[in-house]
Amino acid sequence: MSADAVTTAQDLVVSGWAVSSPYGLGRDGFTAGLREGRRAVAALDSEQWPVPYDEAGLIPGFDIKAVLGRKGTRSMDRVTAIAATTVGMLLEEYGAGLAADPESTGLVLGTSGSVQSIMDFTRDALTGKAPYLVDPARFPNTVMNCPTGQSAIRHTLKGPNVTVSGGAATGLLALNYASRLLRGGHATALLAGAAEEFSVQRARLEHVADHGGSAAEPLGEGAALFLLESGAAARDSGRTVLATVLGCRFRAFRNTGRASAVLRSCADEVLAAAGATPDDIAIVAPGTPPGVFGKEETAALDGLAAPRLAVRPLIGDATAAGAAFQLAAVLAESAARPELVDRIALVTAVDRDGTVGAALLRLG
C-alpha cells in the first residue's frame, strides 16, 4: 500500500451526526439542553409506565407511527423505531452521494436489543393456548440485530451491517468497529452509533441490578449516530470534517477496585498512539456512572485539567446509548465553541460488568 493510501486509510473523520434524545428529535434541542445544563428527566405517567421509577428521560411524545408512518411499523418495537428515525435524520441531512453507492455504505449500531420484545414474546409462548400460537411478525424483534437490520432495510443501506453490545461502552465499541471496517476497505462510509429504549421490562430489570452500591438512577433512552468516512471522501462530498478519530482502546477488569487503573491504561495508550499527552486534552466526556464505578472513573481521570461534560446526570442512564450521547455532546460543544477546533477530546466509559473504554478525537 502506498504512503498516500495509508494516510487516507488512517484519516477517519466524523462528517455528520444525528441524535434522538430526551431533549427531542434533532441536534438543536440536544445542544441547547446540554449547554443550558437543563435536566431532561421528567415525571412518568404511572398508568402508561407501571415501573418502579418516578421519572425517566424519554424522547418527548415519541410515537412510532407518527414519526415513521404506518408502512412497515405494525410490529416495530421502540428501540428499532428510535434507531430507524435517527438513521433517517442523519441520511436526510448528510447523505448526499451515499445513495449512489449503497453497497459501500453500511451501519454499525450498538444496542442491547429490546428486552421488552424478548420477554413479551416469551410470555406469549408460555401463556398462549399453544407455544407456536404467537405473532410471527414480532419474532424478529427478539433478535439483538433487529434495529440494525430494519434500519438498513428501511433506508437502503446495503454495506456492512453490524450489531455490537457492550453495556456502557457500546457506543465506543461501535465507533471502533466501524473504524476497523473502513480501514480494512470493507466500506467507504459507515453510520456508527448506538440506540436504547425505555420500557417496562428494562426498568424492572435495572431496578434490581447491582449499581455499584448506589440506588438505581433514572433511565434514559434515545440514539446518537455518526457518519464516519475518510477525510478525502468527506471533502469530495462537500461535507465538513467535524472530528478526526485518533483511536479507541478497551480493557476489562475483574475487581471493581481495578477499574480506575485499567481505564487510565486505556487513556494512556490511546494518547501515546496519537502522539499526544494529557495536557493536550481540551475536553473530557466521562460516563459518570453513580456509586463506586463513578468513583473509579473519576480516579482514572484525576490529573486531567480539561473540563468535563456532564451528560448522564441530565438525561438519565441511557445504557447502550450512553457513550454515543457523550460523543454527541463533544460534537455539540465543539460546534458552539470555535476555540475547540483542532483540540483533542477524550470520551470514556466504565461498565459495571467489567468493560472500560476510551476514545480520542481531534475536533474540527
Image (spheres, rainbow, N blue to C red):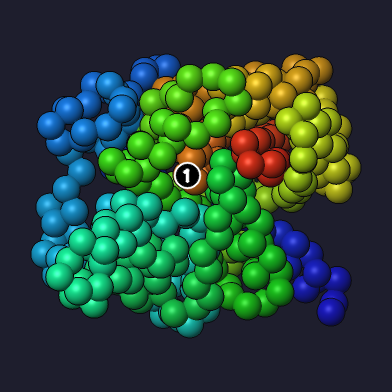
Image location (x, y in percent) of residue 329 = 50, 34
Please give left or right for residue 83 compared with residue 13 in the image: left
Please give left or right for residue 353 compared with residue 32 in the image: right
Picture quarter with the C terminus: top right
Image location (x, y in percent) of residue 341 = 63, 35
Q: In this view, does 201 lie above or below 102?
A: above
- Residue at 13% across, 32% down: 47
Within 10 Å of disc 1 (Cα), the crowding (few <14, some 14-19, many 20+) is: many
Q: Is residue 292 above or below residue 222?
A: above
- How many numbered discs, if any? 1
Residue 355's quadrant in the figure? top right
Q: Nearer the viewer, residue 4 or 116?
A: 116
Residue 277's quadrant in the figure? top right
Q: Nearer the viewer, residue 332 or 318?
A: 318
Judging from the image, what secondary structure is the residue with disc 1 in? helix
Residue type at the position of mark 1? Ala
Image location (x, y in percent) of residue 62 = 20, 43
- Residue at 65% across, 69% down: 182
Which residue was labeled with disc 1? Answer: 321
Q: Which of 39 and 94 is in front in this view?
A: 39
Image location (x, y in percent) of residue 78 = 27, 52
Q: Is residue 6 above or below residue 200?
A: below
- Residue at 41% across, 67% down: 143
Q: From this viewpoint, is residue 2 visible?
A: yes
Picture quarter with the N terminus: bottom right
Q: Nearer the viewer, residue 300 or 282?
A: 300
Q: From this viewpoint, is residue 8 visible?
A: no
Please give left or right for residue 172 compared with residue 156 in the image: right
